[in-house]
Amino acid sequence: MNEKKIDLSDLNMTDEELFAPVNHDDLESEKITAPRYSYWHSVFRVFFKKKINIVLLAVLAVLLVFTYVYPAIIGYDAAVDPYINLMDSTAKHLNPQTAMAKFGSNIHWILGSGASGQSTFDAIWYGSSISVSLALICALINMTIGVIVGAVWGFSKKVDVFMTEVYNVIANIPYILLISVIVLIMSASFWTMVFALTVTGWIGIAYFIRTQVIIIRDREYNLASRCLGTPITRIASKNILPFMTSVIVTLAAAEIPSYISYEVFLSYIGMGLSDMSLGKLIEASQNAMQTPGWEIEFWSPVAVASIITIVLYVVGQNLGDASDPRTHM
Amino acid sequence: MTKYLINRILRGICSIVIVVGIVMVMVYSALDRNLIFAADSMYSHVKSNAKEVYMMQQWERYGYVDYVPYADYMRELVRDEEITQEQYNAAISFANKAEQDSESVAEFVKRFTEEYESKGYKVVRLDGKMKGKTKKYQDGGEPRLYAYKDIPVLMRLVNYFKDLISVDNIHNVEDDIENRGITFTLYDPAYGGEKFSPAVMGNGTHYKYLFYCNDSFPYIHQNLVKINLGLSYSIRQGIDVFQTMTESQGSYAYSTVTYPSGVVAEAADDLHSATYVSGSFAGGGPVVKANFVDDYTNISTNKNGMSKIGYSFTIGIIAVFLSYLVAVPLGIVMALRKDKLLDHIGTFYIVFITAVPSLAYIFLFKSLGGKFGLPTTFDMENPTWLMYVLPIISLSLPSIAGLMKWLRRYMIDQMNSDYVKFARSGGLSEGEIFRKHILKNAIIPIIHDIPGSVLGALTGAIITERVYVVPGVGNMLTRAINAYDNGVIIGMVLFYAVLTVTSVILGDVLMSVLDPRISFTAKAR
């Protein structure tokens, strides 16, 4: 047991002060005091408690700087830079050592040069800026439409019957076919790709959200809320949406990298963008993979794409975990 | 239950029809029809009026328009004996310009124009184009006269589903032939007539053999009912998609064949595939005359390799088995050892597979497998079991990750539920709780996906098959899209849609059979 005792004389208080009666207030005693709770404050507290998340965020920041700032700093021009060494046959397919010996030891050549003598490193980051932008924009559009439609779909039984049939139809149209038809009609530009990936892409998300809404919609607390006369919009925004935040964040975390992967896949089968995105780079260098000594041309865009997707995915998953209020205890 | 199932199946068929309809609108209306000439070398060679006609002919083959040249119309009139050969000869060659036509030509041209315009066709007359001021036509500059009409999508859809399944009958052949009927034999003449092998043969049917036996799986074969998914135009001209998918590939497989004429030879010809081609015996070369006795001369050949669908399914089904075999125990162990080392390793693997583009790890495993001496490309001529290893691994990796992720999730959810706590407080042993309560409940959503993965194995895998050069069905859709082969695109879409709709229904049925709590007859949800 702790034998430490407080000596009252140390407090320098008079007996009156020490033994003053405290008024008992019935009203005060009914109040339940709890520590102040701010949702997003707690989310970030839980998120940053894990040291790995800080490391991952730093890596993500570096990746984003290279993706968006680096091409701007070096003034990368997609119409000029890939072809500056086109006529120089000794500049093509160089490994990092020979490239740096030829062009000087600077950051451009640390991954060697590609099939037309361009710097692989510069091309990767320019490609990455296209791929990441595509993924972010598509995820934003699909998540917004998907969550809104999914919420309505889950709430209304009439909409449910109709939308389930629509889903059965749309889910059966091969994605590749839809994208290639749209690309053929409109041209393989960036915004066409965004359109192609979002024109039906939201329905999968909406379906997922619908299932979640149905699960939560009929819980007892919502039933009670409805019995008390809470309007449906208030149930949706105050009772259900907070519950969905972690689901939505987790879903978004899986969506963003999946668009990068999808872009790589489409480019590989020859249906991708016309811009030199990461997928297009991988597709263009796949022949180099089979040639001994040239593998780095293929593996470096693959590695960068993988690192970006992994970091985005893990950060997003951890943020999703942190945004679940049950982890805030 | 039956009523519910019928309802589900009907709704499934409806959505399949709508999907095919949407795709037809997409490929026939939304796409510029000139795209089919993008990779066509003939197109750049034909010139002037001949180019217009060539375009019409191609569009007709690709199913865009119904095209009738004047000459065909006239020939039909002769065949129907409405006009005589003399009238035909007088009217067939029309002049450079309409006003230069002779009287009989003008009469028939007028008749042709009126008849087809009344049917909604557009009649086009292209005047002859001369080389400068000479009397010679330019390259392809001959005058042309034809009628054409766009085929509406709805009509195409109806026709497509009407022709989807065809049943052979003895009145199939239009020619005048004797002894229409069906014969049954216990000793198939294709094997020399001595070996016991029952067969049903038809005369007047499209196929000569309606049923026959051979020594390859499933031993009894039929030609009576055929599925027509749509004709290919550019990938394999004039061949049905279904046949392309199911036909054997590779080098010729020779065997002793007894031809209908009695000639015995070592050949790869598959006599059981004989179909009727009008006038082929009379017009055939000496080989045909020596081997055959009637017009059932169109035969395909036996080949050593499997069919496209065969390769895809072999790889796919082994990968499915392997993934359930690996993923189910691993997922269970991960859930039981939650937050221990094994769980972390498993989670890392799941994150890796989910986040990294599939292309990256397929290539990674290809190069790793190559280092261990495994064959990295598929070789139909020298098949070994080793060449299946890498494609199977590449296919199972992502499905293992997916299965592990969900099984672990479901298990943990069940472990935290109240009935498990109750069972524990009731004194049940951990093993009993695990086997009889947790696993039984957690495995049900996993079982729901089994029909989907088994049927999904039929569709092949795009990247895996491309990377390992597997001659499977996975690449057919992308190849068809690149070649604007509308017939193949629609056939493949129908094939995919049927498989997905079936697998969802089968999954629901399987789930309701295994879990008595799930009932589809209950009205309230």
Image: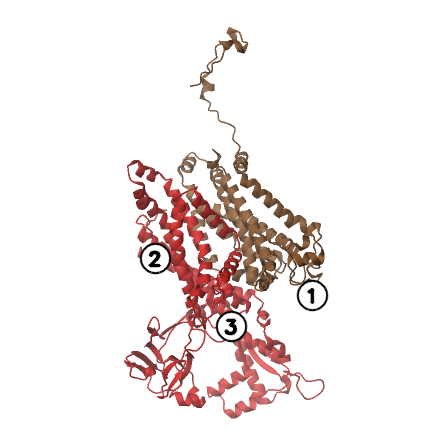
- Label 2 secondary element: helix
| Residue under numbered circle 2 | B5
Find disc 3 in the rendering and name its residue: B235
Q: Secondary structure at mark 1?
A: helix
Q: In red, which chain?
A: B
Label 1 sits on what residue type?
A: Ser
Q: Position of residue A51 (x, y in %)?
A: 54, 38
The residue positioned 31% from the left and 46% from the top of the image is: B435
Q: Are marks 2 and 3 on the same chain?
A: yes
Q: CA distance from mark 2 to mark 3?
A: 38 Å
Q: Residues within 10 Å of mark 2 (few under 14, many from 20)?
A: some
Disc ID at residue A89: 1
Marks 2 and 3: which is nearer the front?
A: 3
Q: Marks 3 and 1, how far apart in space?
A: 38 Å
Residue B380's place in the image compared with B195, above or below, is above
Residue A222 is situated, as x and y percent measured from the top left of the image, at 42, 37
Q: Along the polypeptide, which appears first: circle 2 or circle 3?
A: 2
